[in-house]
C-alpha cells in the first residue's frame, strides 16, 4: 500500500527533530507529506522552510495554527486578527493545503463562552477576505470539549459546520479523530461536511484508556479505543480522500523515543489500522 | 436566603466522613438534603442508612449510581441488569428522588461505541419496568465526552433526551454543570428537557483552568469558569426549581480539607454564585 496519503504533523516528532531534520527523516522512509507548526517554521526561518518544501516537492497538509481569537479587550482581538493574517501569509509561502484554526477558549477571567464564540465568528469573518484573496482555505478544527475553556470553544463538528455555513466560502473543517470520536452525531456530520466540500484535513492519533494528561497523552493509532477505519470510511464515503495526518502529543511516551522509531510506527499503524 | 435547595452529594466529603457523620455535619449547618453513593450506603448498612434518612427527615436528591451496562458478553449485561434492579430497591428504601444513571463506557477491548450505546438503551429498557413498578425515576446523567471511553457513552444532554424519548415515562436526566457547560446546544436542550418534565436533578461544581486530572480535579463553585447562574436560570425557566446538589471529586484539594470547612464553603458559594 502507498504512503501517498500519510502525512506527519511535525508536533509528533517535535522533541526529536528540527523541521529540516524531520523532513529528512520522513523522506528517508518514503513519507512526502508533512504539517509543520508555526514555531517550527519560525525556528527554521520562513524562507528556508519554504525552500525545504519546494526543493523536496513536499505536500504540506496544513500549517498549525491560526485562531486564538477571544481576548479580554479590543486590542487583544485586533492583535489576534493581525497575527492570523501573518499566519495566512506563512501558509501561502509554504504552499499549505490549509491553515488549521484552533479558535481559542475563554478570555482570562471570563465565564461567558457564548461571548467567546461570538468573538471567534467575528475574528474568522475579519480574516476571511485576506484568506480568500490568497486562496488559503481556513480549516476550523473542533477541539474536544475538555479544551473548551482554554484552547477552543468550537467543540463539535456540527458547531464548526454551523460556523462554516455562516461564513460561506473559503472555510472548512479539520477533522481530528481525537477530538470527535465520541460524538453521537459524528457520522451524520461527516456526511454533511463532505457534501458541502468542507473537509480540508483528517488528523489521526488514538484515545488512550486511561488518559493520564488532558493535553500530552495522545496515543499511537491502534493503542487506544478509536475505531480509525470506521471514521475513515465515513470520511471517504463523504467524498474526501486526502491524506491522514498523524498528530501525537505524547510527553511521556512517543516524544521520548527515537524519531526514527516513531515514524516507523506511524507508517506501520497507518497501514495496519487506518487505511481501508 | 434558604438552604432548602442545597443538597450535598456525599462524594464531596467521602474522605472525611461516613454517611452518618456527613449527615450530622450537614444538619449542624442547616443542610437537610443529601445524595449518598451506594458504597457509602453499603458501609453503613441499608436499613441503618434508611433510618438515618427517615429519622432526620432528610431529602435524598438521588442515589449514586446505577448504570454501567455495556459488557463484553451476555452474562456481563445480565449481571449489570440485576445489579441495577438492586440499586432501584436501595433508592426506594432511601426514598430517593431518583436513581442516578452513569451508563457505562466501552466494554474491554471494544472500539465500538455505537454498540455500547445500544447496550445502554437495552439495559435501561430492561430495568425500566422494575423502576416504574416502584415509582423510582431513572436519571440518565450525560457525562463529559472525556469519559466516553471508560465511564459513560451518553455524552450530551441532547443524546440523553433522545434516549428518554425512546424509552417513555419513568426516565429523565441529571444535569451536572461539569459535564455539560461547554455544550453549544445546552440552553436549547435544557428548555427541551424542562418542557418534557425530564429534569430530575441539577448537580453543581466548577471546571478549573487548568484541570490537572481527568477525574479528581473538580472545583468548588466560583473557583472555575462555569457560569453557574446562567445555567441555573435556564433550568428554572424550563420549569425545574428543585435542589442544586454539590458533587466535587477533588483528591488534592477539597478531600484534604476538614469536612466542616468544605460544607461551610459549599453553603457560602451556593448562596453567592449559584442562586438567582
Image: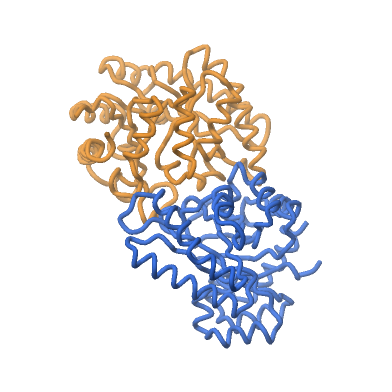
Chain colours: A blue, B orange
Q: Is residue A130 above or below residue B81?
A: below
Residue A212, percent across and down? 48, 56
Q: Residue at x 47, y 44 (%)?
A: B183
Q: Where is residue A241 in the image (x, y as percent from the top left)?
A: 74, 61
Q: Position of residue B80 (x, y in %)?
A: 58, 28
Q: In this view of the protein, which residue sits in the foreground, B155 or B30?
A: B155
Residue B161 horizontal side relative to residue B98, left or right: right
Residue lying furthest top in this view?
A: B133
Asked if residue B110 can be seen in this view, the reply is no
**What residue is drawn where x is 67% and y is 68%?**
A265
The C terminus of chain A lies in which quarter of the figure? bottom right
In the shown orientation, is residue A74 left or right of residue B171? left
In the depicted structure, whether residue B158 falls above or below residue B226: above
Q: Residue furthest right?
A: A1
- Compared to residue B223, the image places residue B31 above or below, namely above
Look at 65% across and 82% down and name the residue there. Answer: A53
Q: Does residue B118 appear left or right of residue A124 in this picture?
A: right
Residue B13 found in image quarter: top left
Residue A113 can be seen, yes or no? yes
Task: Assign the N terminus of chain A to one quadrant of the image.
Answer: bottom right
Residue A3 picture location, percent across and down: 75, 70
Amino acid at each position: 500500500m502507498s504512503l501517498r496519503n500519510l502525512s506527519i504533523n511535525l508536533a509528533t516528532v517535535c522533541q526529536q527533530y528540527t523541521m529540516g531534520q524531520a523532513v529528512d527523516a520522513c523522506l528517508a522512509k518514503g513519507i512526502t507529506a508533512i504539517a509543520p507548526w508555526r514555531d517550527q517554521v519560525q525556528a527554521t526561518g520562513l524562507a528556508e522552510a519554504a525552500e525545504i518544501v519546494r526543493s523536496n516537492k513536499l505536500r504540506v497538509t496544513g500549517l498549525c495554527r491560526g485562531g486564538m481569537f477571544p481576548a479580554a479587550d479590543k486590542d487583544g482581538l485586533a492583535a489576534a486578527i493581525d497575527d492570523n493574517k501573518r499566519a495566512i501569509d506563512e501558509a501561502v509561502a509554504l504552499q499549505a493545503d490549509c491553515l488549521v484554526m484552533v479558535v481559542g477558549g475563554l478570555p482570562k477571567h471570563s465565564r461567558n463562552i457564548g461571548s467567546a464564540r461570538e468573538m471567534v465568528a467575528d475574528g474568522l469573518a475579519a480574516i476571511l477576505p485576506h484568506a480568500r484573496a490568497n486562496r488559503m482555505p481556513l480549516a476550523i478544527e473542533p477541539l474536544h470539549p475538555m479544551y473548551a475553556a482554554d484552547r477552543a470553544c468550537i467543540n463539535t463538528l456540527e458547531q464548526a459546520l454551523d460556523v462554516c455555513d455562516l461564513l460561506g466560502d473559503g472555510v472548512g473543517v479539520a477533522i481530528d479523530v481525537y477530538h470527535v470520536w465520541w460524538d453521537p452525531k459524528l457520522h451524520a456530520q461527516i456526511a454533511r461536511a463532505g457534501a458541502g466540500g468542507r473537509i480540508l484535513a483528517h488528523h489521526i492519533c488514538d484515545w488512550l484508556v486511561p488518559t493520564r494528561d488532558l493535553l500530552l497523552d495522545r496515543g499511537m493509532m491502534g493503542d487506544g479505543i478509536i475505531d480509525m477505519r470506521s471514521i475513515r470510511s465515513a470520511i471517504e464515503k463523504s467524498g474526501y480522500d486526502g491524506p491522514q495526518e498523524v498528530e501525537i502529543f505524547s510527553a511521556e511516551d512517543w516524544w521520548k523515543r527515537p524519531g526514527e522509531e516513531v515514524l516507523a510506527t506511524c507508517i506501520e499503524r497507518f497501514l495496519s489500522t487506518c487505511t481501508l
